[in-house]
Structure formats: structure tokens, C-alpha cells
Amino acid sequence: MPADDIISIIFLLVKEKQATNHYLCDYFDATPTQIEQAINQIQESGFQITVDRQSDPTYQLITPQVMYKKFVTFDQILNLYLSLTDEPNPKGKNQLRDFALRVELAELRAPYMSEFEDIKGAFLHRMIADLFMAQRDRKVVNLDYVDVKYDRTNRDIEPMEVFYQDHQWYVWAYCRLREDFRIFKISQTMEIHPKSEKFIRRPFTIFEGVNDPRSFRDLYFVTFELDKSLKSQLNTTFKMDKRLITKDKIVILEKDLYSFEYAQAWLKQFGDKVKVVDPPQLKEAFEQ
């Protein structure tokens, strides 16, 4: 089967609880053997699909859940496509946008059209590709969109995962305005502006957020001192944190930095202008 049809099978299995071999044969105008081979290829790329081998085999995609619904990430689909073809991994913006368009057409089950350029503006593939590139390259994105209250809002986000669920594309990201993880639906009302600023990836994946990715993480509190020359950053980097400004230094009291590894990487950006007070293990690592 063509790679695009095999990707379509993934989207169909995300939408449906299960699908029979006969149903997939009719849907994709394929033989039972072709469908079985396609399922094997999907499994070999890392997807978990259970097969109930009755007279008509029945397939079910097993995935983690977010908000009680299964999902598939853009990265998983890209890895599936690369395993099915000899094509190189798309690196540049235009290459990723073209691939994202193929993914969208596979999801919509639409035929490829001769007037390729005319349909580009009708889909979300550009935003999907740009957000995925920012996720991959760890670049901050300025997001301008209409929220659930129909108010336009602007904020900087750190994209963690681009995923598909319930007939929609979403980006799971750390929102710097709210200082927490959020899910944003990718839509035509959204404007995306990738920035040159890089971020240190926070130590979580969406797969750990079984019900709601905003509620699963543990806390790792760190107390540290900063050089007074960093005072200008207080109202941006540390605006939500407890802090104490003394005559010769700034003390940040119990900032949540998620884990030892993330805290170490994040604090290193301040060089010799930071001194860890607590916890002892992190303090010792910085003193060495």
C-alpha cells in the first residue's frame, strides 16, 4: 500500500475504537493481505496495535490518553513515514510544510490535487510544521490566538509536543504567561511567530499526562542567590517567584525547577552569577 494510505490507517484507528480487516479493505480499496502487511509495517515502526484474529481480523490502536482520549503525535507519524520510504528526514521549513500537508491530506482522506499551491492556504499544515520545527529545535514561539472566552491573547510558549486527537491538531506547550503547561488547539485564528530564543526543554513528555498534562508533575524546589546585576530580569524570568532583595544579592526562595537535571541545566545559564543554597545535592554539584 502507498505510504499515504498507511498513514490514513493510523488516523482512522485514532478516530475509531476498532476496525475490521474487511472495513479497511473497502475503505482503501485494498486486499486483506495488503491490509495485514500495512498493519505489520505500522507495528514495526513502534505503534501498538492489537489484533483480534477472528474470521475477520479486528484491529485496535493502543495509545496513551490525554483528557481520556487517545492521540498520535506528529513525530510518530513522521517516524512511520520514514520507516515506509527511502526519503530523507525533512529538515528545512518548506520540506516540513510539504510533509505536514501530506499528513493533513492523509487525515482528510482527500486525493492529491493538481493545483497544489491553491489549496495550501486552506489547511493548517504550515502552523503544524512550524510548531513541530520549534519543538524539535527548542525555539520559543510567540502565539497570538483566540481563547475559549473568545478573547484574543498573546503569549510566549515552549512547544513540547504537536499531536492529533478527536479530529483536531493541538500543541502541548509550556506557557510562560501562566507558568504552567497548556494545550492549545491549532486553528486558522492562530498566528505563530517563531523566535530566535532557545529554551531548555522541561523534563516531561505528554505520555506521562494520562488525564490532563497540567496535573501530573512532581515538584523540585530550589533556593538560590543571584548577583545584583541580574536585577533587570526579576520582572520577566522571576516575576511569579518569591524573592528577597538584599544589599548585595537577590535570593530566589523555592523556585520549582522540576528535577535535579533540569535545575542544573537551567541554572547554568547564569554562569558564575548564581549560587545554589538548597537542596544539598544540587548545591554540591554547583560547588564542584
Image (spheres, helix red, strand yellow):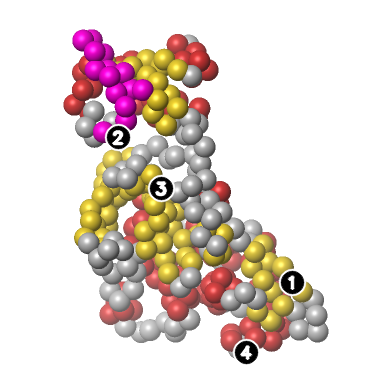
Give the spatial CA distance, label 4 vs label 1. 18 Å
What residue range appears in magenta?
A: 239-253
| Image: 177 above or below 186 | above
Q: Amino acid at mark 3?
A: Phe
Residue 243 covered by magenta stretch: yes
- Residue that label 4 marks: 26
Q: Residue furthest left?
A: 232
Of circles 4 and 1, the one toward us is: 1
Q: Element type at marker 3?
A: strand
Of the 4 image quadrants, the one containing the N terminus is bottom right
Name the residue tied to disc 3: 181
Where does label 2 land, which residue? Answer: 240
For marks 2 and 3, give the one nearer the viewer.
Answer: 2
Number of other residues with Cα within 10 Å of mark 4, as a class: few under 14, some 14 to 19, many 20 or more: few
Q: Along the line of sight, which residue is nearer the eye, 140 or 209? A: 209
| Real-space CA distance between mark 2 and mark 1, rounded to the nearest whole angstrom | 50 Å
Q: Earlier in the sequence, mark 2 or mark 3?
A: 3
Q: Residue at x 37, y 19 (%)?
A: 224
Residue 287 visible in rendering: yes
Name the residue located 48 percent from the left edge and 76 percent from the top edge: 106
Label 4 sits on a secondary structure element that is: helix
Q: Position of residue 82 (x, y in %)?
A: 54, 61
Q: Which residue is mark 1?
A: 51
Earlier sequence position, callout 3 versus callout 4: 4
